[in-house]
Every structure is written in structure tokens, then in C-alpha cells.
Image (cartoon, grey):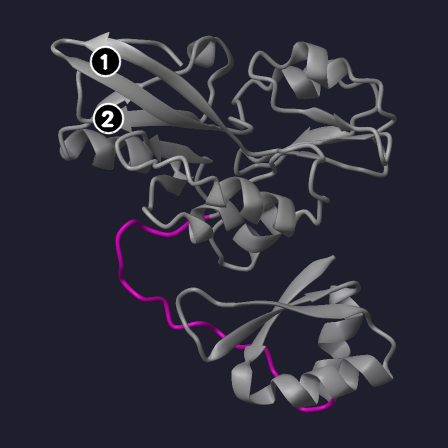
Amino acid sequence: MGMLMIKAEELEKAKEVLKKGGVEFGVHTYHPDDASVVVLKVADAGKAKRMLEEAGVSEAEPGRLLREPGFVEPKRKLGFLFNLDRCIGCRSCEIACKMEKELPAGSIRPMRVIELGPEKAGERLRYDFVPMNCFHCGSAPCAEACPTGAMQKRQDGIVFVDAEACIGCKQCIKACPFGAPQYDSATGKVVKCDLCMHRVDAGLEPACVAKCPTRAILAGGIAELRRRALQRGLNLLQPVHAEEVEACVSYATRFELVRQV
């Protein structure tokens, strides 16, 4: 599957061209920065692009709006920042992730929200909702354990599974200290968060980021995300084993740190 961006006004023409050419596609989403741009999810991006160009439908460049937080920059070492103070446990991220990966209800959850607490923090009780997915480790133990090379790491730090090469041996599951890779019994393959790399490559935010109503989940250059959080006076909490594997994720809170995730 690939992603193409076209002008919204040319959508109907593009759909007609792709249908005649026998290219499977879906109107995936409107670009979050520019409503005049439509993102198409196509089975054969190269063929679709050639057909659309021949029909006079050119690719569109979205006008990027300046809003907080910043957007994903594929050339940076990418990761996640989760603001625990903002997460309300609505699980919109879980739903968005499953829809993006076309996983049926009741199946595995590459993005999971776990509940911690309540526990006493000073004179108050604290109860946290903690998003958990792949932490895209700098020294990814899952990739090292994979015997077929199906678990791979891109130059921008994204760790992903090549489904065609995956044999479902579950060695990556045993190696991951965070429980990120999960076995899908329906396909016999391992599935995990890949930071929605097809969206990142199209200039979009990961689905979980785009659908979070409180903006509790941020994705982008991990060093920049951490720097911004510290500038705002937030405390950063690293998961257990994070330093050992150079996990590209941090949890942020304005409260005193009382636990490890």
C-alpha cells in the first residue's frame, strides 16, 4: 500500500481514473493541515501516480499550518512523547490505531492504554492512563532477535515488521521488554506499531496522534519533543529498561515523579 496526495477538487476525476485502471484505492483521509488536500491509499502507488499524471491529476503539496505541537519530521530520530496530565483514558488512540491497520474488533492492540493507580502522591491520590505502544528503540532487541530479518529499523529510527518475511516464530515478542510486538493468530504474523510510517512518509501525523482529542500524544523528533517538555517545566519519566535499549519515548507530567512506568 502507498499514499498519494491530490487536490480535493480533483478527487472524483482521480477515482474514475483509478477504477478504469484497476488500481485498488481508498479515500484514506483529508490532510490534517489542509482541507483542500485529499490523501489516497492505493495498492500500487507507482502505477497510480503514472495514471493520474497522464490524466492531468497532479500531486498536491499541503499548506502546513503552524500549530502546537510540531509535526513529524521524517529526517529526525522519531519517537513519542506522552503527556500523562492530558490523557483522559478515552482510548481514541487505540481505536485509531486498529482502524489504520484494519484490525478487527477484539483482536490485538498495537496501541494500548493501561491504568495505573490510584496511589498516594503527597496529599493527593494519583490515577494515570498510560499509552503503551512500540518505543522504537535505538538498539531494538526485537530486530536483533528476529531470525529472518522481518523486524527492521529505518534510518529515521522507526522499527517495523516486513509481513512477508515474518514467520510468526515469536522471538521478537520474547525479546521486547515492553510487550510491543504481538502475535496475530488470524494471520500467523507479528504486528506492532510502526509509527504509521506510511503516513509519516506522506507528511501526516501517526493516526493515534491525529485522533487524540486532548493532544496527549505527540510524535516527532524525540530530542526536540523532550526539549520542549522540559522548557514547559514538565518532568520526564522514562519507562523501565528505556535507557538500556535507547527507547525513543518519554512520559511527561507537571507533578513530582512518584513511579516508574
Q: Position of residue 179 (x, y in %)?
A: 61, 18
Image side of residue 17 versus residue 75, left or right: right
Classify residue 169 as left or right of residue 64. right
How many residues crowd mark 1 within 10 Å: few (<14), some (14–19), many (20+)?
few
Q: Amino acid at mark 1?
A: Leu
- Secondary structure, magenta segment, majority class: loop
Q: Which residue is mark 1?
A: 257
Indicate the secondary structure of the residue bearing disc 2: strand
Q: Amino acid at mark 2?
A: Thr
Q: Residue at x 17, y 26 (%)?
A: 254
Picture disc at residue 241: none
User: For residue 91: magenta?
Assistant: no
Q: Nearer the viewer, residue 153 or 29?
A: 29
Q: Residue at x 22, y 8 (%)?
A: 120
Element type at marker 1? loop
Q: Residue at x 67, y 18 (%)?
A: 142
Q: Which residue corresponds to the image point at 62% horizontal and 52% vertical from the top-left? A: 198
The span from disc 1 to disc 2 (Cα, nearest Å) is 8 Å
Q: Nearer the viewer, residue 259 or 55?
A: 259
Location of residue 155 in the rendering, given as x and y in whole percent from the top left corner: 57, 36
Span highlighted in magenta in the image? 55-73
Image quadrant in which you'd find residue 76: top left
Q: Position of residue 88 (x, y in %)?
A: 34, 37
**Does the CB distance between marks 1 and 2 fall below 8 Å?**
yes
Relative to 234, say whether 257 is above or below. above
Viewer-proximal residue among 113 and 155: 113
Q: Is residue 222 visible?
A: no
Q: How crowded is the residue under tag 2: few (<14 C-alpha within 10 Å), some, or many (20+)? A: some
| Numbered circle sitting on residue 253 | 2
Q: Is residue 129 found left or right of 193 in the rendered image?
A: left
